[in-house]
Image: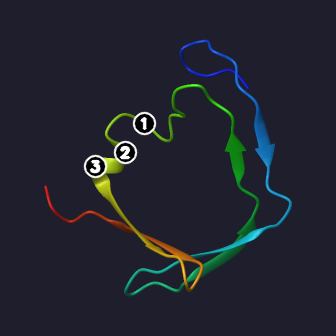
Amino acid sequence: MQGAGGNEFKIYKSPLEIDCETEKRGFRSLYWKTKVYFSESGTFTLLGYKGFFESINVDLKAQKREINITANKAG
């Protein structure tokens, strides 16, 4: 794969699918399965757009094997 800066790096698709779910009060939940990708990079891998991580909160629950991503209501 080629990055935004023109550098090339390898990506690997996960062998297993993960379960995804979206929840929003007043709307029905959505569920789907997907595979994730991992990359080899000497520096970093850009995810999303500039400022993307300023708009979300990520809660990692290792023992439950869950990741909860919610909108950042501050700011």
Relative image position of residue 24 (x, y in whole percent): 41, 80
Tag 2: residue type?
A: Phe
Give 24 or 66, whichever is nearer the viewer. 66
Color encoding of the figure: rainbow
Label 3 vs 1, first from the N-terminus:
1
Distance from the alpha carbon under mark 3 to that under mark 1: 10 Å
Q: In this orientation, which residue lies closer to the viewer: 34 or 30?
A: 34
Residue 40, above or below 27: above
What is the spatial separation of the Cα atoms under label 2 and label 3, in whole angstroms? Answer: 5 Å
Q: Element under label 3?
A: helix
- Residue with the mark numbered 2: 52
Look at the numbered discs 2 and 1 and tell me whether their residues touch, using CB distance below 8 Å. yes
For badge 3, the amino acid type reads Glu
Vertical placement of residue 20 versus 50, above or below? below
Residue 10: x and y in percent read 76, 30
Q: Is residue 56 left or right of residue 60?
A: left
State the image coordinates of residue 42 (x, y, percent, origin top left).
59, 25
The residue at which mark 3 appears reads as 54
Q: Are marks 2 and 3 in contact (CB under 8 Å)?
A: yes
In the rendered image, which quarter contains the N terminus?
top right
The answer to which of 17 and 28 lies nearer the viewer is 17
Residue that badge 1 annotates: 49
Q: Find numbered disc 2 in the image and state the secondary structure of the residue it sits on.
A: helix
